[in-house]
Amino acid sequence: MLQSINPATEKEVHKQPPLSDADCHERIERSHEAYLLWKERSFSERADVLKKVAQVMKDDIERLALLMTDEMGKPIKEARGEVQKAIWCAEHYAEHAEQYLAPVTMASDATHSYVQHLPIGPILGILPWNAPFWLAFRFCAPALMAGNTCLMKHDPHVPLCAQAIADVFAHAGAPINIMQNLPIETPQVEAVIRHKFVRGVSLTGSSAAGSKVAAIAGSEIKPVVLELGGSDPVIVMADADLDKAADVITLSRIINAGQSCIATKRIIVESPVYDEFIAKLEARLSKLKVGDPRSEQTDIGPIARPDLRETLARQVNETVKAGARCVIGGEVADAIGYFYPVTLLADVTNDMVACREETFGPVAVVLKAQDLTDAVRIANDTEYGLAASIWTDTKRAESVINQFESGQVTVNGIVKTDPRLPSGGIKRSGLGRELGPHGILAFVNAQQVWIGPKVE
């Protein structure tokens, strides 16, 4: 059963049975039929569809945002921003896809040789609950503009968001079946991946889920893009603008109640400013309001599910037992809603649970480094490699950027995803890239063309 529970009230929002296996396979076949027509559309025709989809969302931002707020607890002011970012993604690929996929002439012994980028067929997107609209469009906008069709298997805890995304395409008058919702349960996913008409898989989720999906897709020789978990480090050196760094790191840690793969999770501070920086973080985190995600005054909403809150509480408790100091928070209130208090842990070391596991919640952990070399060592001492950031003199930062074991690095700013720039991880944080020109190239046939006669 697909069911959404409002995490702020613990009341049921929606419940529906999953799609039957027969109906699921019928939708896949329809996706293939739609692909045969969609791939023949010009870039301008595809762009027109994406622009109409973007306009439908612009006209309905408030309702779409509230679906996220009620199904997974995203504060309403953040939820509006997420819909706007999804709109940006659709418009970006509508504008730039043709340029990204332009044929590339390459020298050889041919009269003319080049590589062209062709669609490959229906692509399955397996999506999580934490950013229902943004992650759906990060997946579908480039895939559709490349000429593929999309099958969306969204998280079972946000069924109304998933249906709303599919409905946006219908309301925009998009060609039927180019973007379909597959409201199915996890055990049904393997058969979808193995279906002969499904030609690629994009997954955003945990490292465990990514490993399973990659194994299935690999056995079928199908391409995958995996955006998985992270334990993202931020380094704060003594010469940094400490107030600006504290502002940005606080924001990065608490966006979406800390339930973000690329949120700052390990704050590594150089020893001369360690105590001072903890005080700055404490001052900022203490002012944040946890509460009703429908309220404009709320900074942090609830954790999406009770099991996720239990995991977070365990991680904090075990880290404190191992010797960390709890500066603020750390105690779950006995009240309605899956809320977790803003928590700051100091004197944390990399062998503690809060560093070895991904923490999905408003928990900031601070580690001490002796110098820049030590800080980079600590940053890389993790099985994850999604994103990293550093606060110091720009030239000094640039001298160590290539030492970071991560898919992206930010200097003196917030780590974020941007439709213009590729995003993805290494190690257990994933493989492949989304967004930017790299993202749209993930699911195309880079076809080499050699035209004779041979040049002697």
Image (spheres, rainbow, N blue to C red):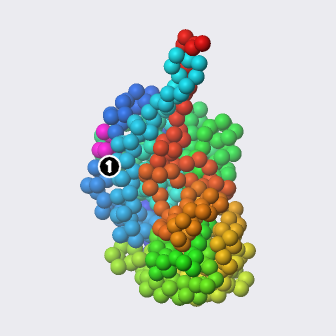
Which region is colored magenta? 48-54
Residue furthest front as drawn: 395
Residue 206 in view here: no
Above or below residue 33? Residue 412 is below
Within the image, what quadrant is residue 418 found in?
Answer: bottom left
Q: Nearer the viewer, residue 379 or 176?
A: 379
The magenta stretch spans residue 22: no
Q: Secondary structure at mark 1?
A: helix
> For mark 1, does the 10 Å Cα neighbourhood hold few (<14), some (14 to 19), or many (20 or more) residues?
many
Q: Is residue 214 above or below residue 341?
A: above
Question: Could you say which quadrant of the image residue 197 lies in?
Answer: top right
Q: Is residue 110 visible?
A: yes
Q: Residue at x 62, y 37 (%)?
A: 222
Taking the image as shown, residue 88 lies to the left or right of residue 258, namely left
Residue most extreme to the left: 59
Pick the residue in front: 46 or 246: 246
At 51% from the left and 83% from the top, the residue drawn is: 281
The amino acid marked with disc number 1 is Ala
- Residue beneath disc 1: 54
Lateral position of residue 203 relative to residue 160, left or right:
right
In this rendered view, identify the residue nearer to me: 373 or 4.
373
SS assignment for the magenta stretch, majority: helix
**Residue at left 48%, top 78%?**
241
Residue 105 place in picture, x, y as percent? 50, 27
Residue 60 pos. (x, y %): 28, 57
Q: Quadrant of the C terminus?
A: top right
Q: Position of residue 261 (x, y in %)?
A: 55, 63
